[in-house]
Image: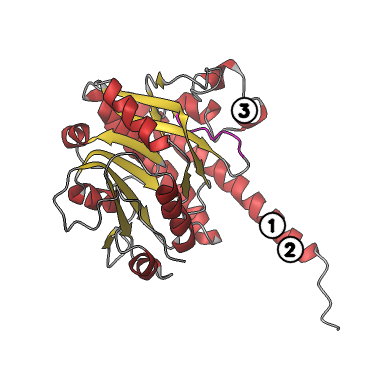
Amino acid sequence: MEFTADRKSVGDGGTTAAVTLSVIISCYNTRELLSDCLQSIYRNPPSEPYEIIVVDDASTDGTSEMVRARLPGVRLLRNEINCHYAFSNNRAIDQARGQYLLLLNSDTVVLPQSLDRMIALLRMHPVAGAVGCRLLNEDGTIQWSVKSLPNPGSALFGARSFMSRVFPNNRFTRKHLLHLGRDMTTPFVADDGYVSSASLMAPRKVVDAVGYLDTRLAYHVDADYCKRIADAGYQCWYLPTAIMIHLNHKGGTTANTRVRFRSLLMFEVHSYIYYRKHVQRSVWSPMQILVPLGLFAHFLILVAAQACAEFVGVMRSLLQPKKSLAP
């Protein structure tokens, strides 16, 4: 299937026409998800000139070939080796020509008017440094995509915590999952919080002031960026009337057990990097010892939970009745 670009799509960089929005999509082995994402943009484009930049992070599933064959108007960049999310987005940021930049995951589906509404909010509020939209799961439920910045409390009552899953409306969880109890027809500032980089739009001037994404981070890269935006004197907004579907990490790379366990370790390592960068106040604080110990304990809990999940999955596959090969 070949897509037809909207007439306001600027193209592959061979023109000097003014661009309002640069849509940046970094992807790795998500050919079909990326195809659906791009199709959704062309179905529901912004009303002003825009460009799409896809960074193929050394995929082996024919992603680049698909883009070249079906969408010659997309600006395609390809990494020869897998450089990961932050590096790939930074490369596209260097190439982007838009007044506004949208970091968009390849496992998202853009819905009508979402892009125009995000641009309008940034224009309406000059102090707005970033805006995130309402992300929906595949079944239509709301994803927890506007949250407090990482802190010890978020480990206990954040999106990943047992307490939040069992008792999602308790008063402690509401302090960390910032959309809970809110009027979902009205935008709000995520004070001391951040919005998901699955769909995060920022003005070019703010990106230039804040700088690149931190290439040391995969986890917390959006929290780090929103914290730096706030430190630069801007606000991060959540716009619930701009809606997209996020297929919840179907575009990720956790396809086997080894990678899944390694990702648990990376989460703790990146949490410590974030702590050292934004939270640590003194090298002599007892938190210098308590935080690594707490992260290690958290890692052990996650490993135990993951091991149980893996074991259950194996047992279910073994206990399932085998299909007969007889005709």
Query: What type is the residue that disc 3 sits on?
Result: Met
Q: Which residue is mark 3?
A: 163
* Colour setting: secondary structure
Q: Tag 1 or tag 3, which sits nearer the N-term?
A: 3
Residue 256 lies within the magenta run = no
Residue 141 lies within the magenta run = yes
Asked if the residues shown at circle 1 and circle 2 are in contact, with their CB atoms under 8 angstroms apart, the answer is: yes
Q: Residues within 10 Å of mark 3 (few under 14, many from 20)?
A: some
| Label 2 element class | helix
Q: Which residue is mark 1?
A: 313
What separation in Å lies between label 3 and label 1 (alpha carbons)? 24 Å
Query: What type is the residue that disc 2 sits on?
Result: Ser
Query: What type is the residue that disc 1 sits on?
Result: Gly
Q: Is residue 284 above or below residue 33?
A: above
What separation in Å lies between label 3 and label 2 (alpha carbons)? 29 Å
Q: Residues within 10 Å of mark 2 (few under 14, many from 20)?
A: few
Determine the residue positioned at 62% across, 25% down. 168
Please report the bounds of the magenta region as a residue range.
140-146
Q: Residues within 10 Å of mark 1 (few under 14, many from 20)?
A: few
